[in-house]
Image (cartoon, rainbow, N blue to C red):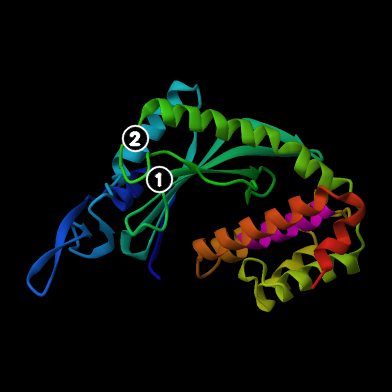
Amino acid sequence: MNTNIQNTNETETDLFDYEVKQVNLHADGRQTRWLGNVRTDTGECLGVCSDRYDLVQNRSLIDTSESLFKSKGLTNWERKVVVTHGGAKSRAVYRFPSLGIKVAKNDLIFALKVQNSFDGSLRASFNVGLFRLICSNGMTIPHKSINLSHKHTGTLNLETMSDALDRAISDFTKSAPIFERMSVIDISQKQGEDIIDSMVKRGIGGLSERQAEGVKSVWANPTHHEDRERSLWNLFNAFTQHITHGIENGERPRFELAERISSAVTSEFARAAANPTLAVPMLVTA
């Protein structure tokens, strides 16, 4: 899989700013109702869709999103662009240092992933997340993507996008109690290791034994003073630290794997935190 990641605004524009056009596909010399989504600069067909499906261009989605951020008073953001599968999928991940919450004495800032695809795998949508300031660990919030375009059309409606952003910010602020509940669920070192092993056995997010060893290493030797306590929150941070720095930004960056594991692990921990007395049994159930 070809994954490109850029962190500087000067160069990342070239990364996402390509056009995709739809061309008619033929079979046995006859035109079908299927269209190929072709990247104009490389000539590569990124996906096939029906004639009812319209495209959202990356440039339009990102420009409209950033204009919307400014209109809401969200400025001075940090942006990272990730393009995979030859351009079939793209994400722009934003951090907003001016918008934050506090959980267990940790400062967490609002993060938003704007995603798009030309192979039908991703709708133009917002995904909400957050970053922990002391270590820049990224984590997701357990909820569904917020769609930005109407079904089967590539129309971006500013009012719809504005409502989606308001909902995203609301979801972010409402997530604090979920993570706060994790911080008051005490666990032992061994229980933490059992939970990690269970995640592997149950195939949560495709977490492998090798990746689990990375999480165990962080859990056994916390990098930050704030993580020396033994709670579900500290174990969750061990997961997010390894996912962020060992998988997403490791020697061989694997953004989509990190995304999948992060989402699955967050959902598992949030589900367990809703039932404090049963949290550990729920997480170690094979």
Residue closer to the observer: 123 or 128: 123
Q: Is residue 220 visible?
A: no
Residue 192, given in percent of the width and then of the height, sits at: 84, 65
What is the span of residues highlighted in magenta in the rendered image?
Answer: 232-243
Question: Position of 123 compared to 176: left or right?
Answer: left
Q: Amino acid at mark 1?
A: Ala
Question: Position of 124 compared to 272: left or right?
Answer: left
Residue 79, given in percent of the width and then of the height, sits at: 46, 43
Secondary element at tag 1: loop
Dominant secondary-structure state across the stretch colored magenta: helix
Query: Against 184, is 74 above or below?
Result: above
Query: Against 250, is 8 above or below?
Result: above
Q: Amino acid at mark 2?
A: Leu
* Mark 2 lies on residue: 156
Label pair 1/2, CB-CB below 8 angstroms: yes
Q: Residue at x 78, y 71 (%)?
A: 198
* Mark 1 lies on residue: 124
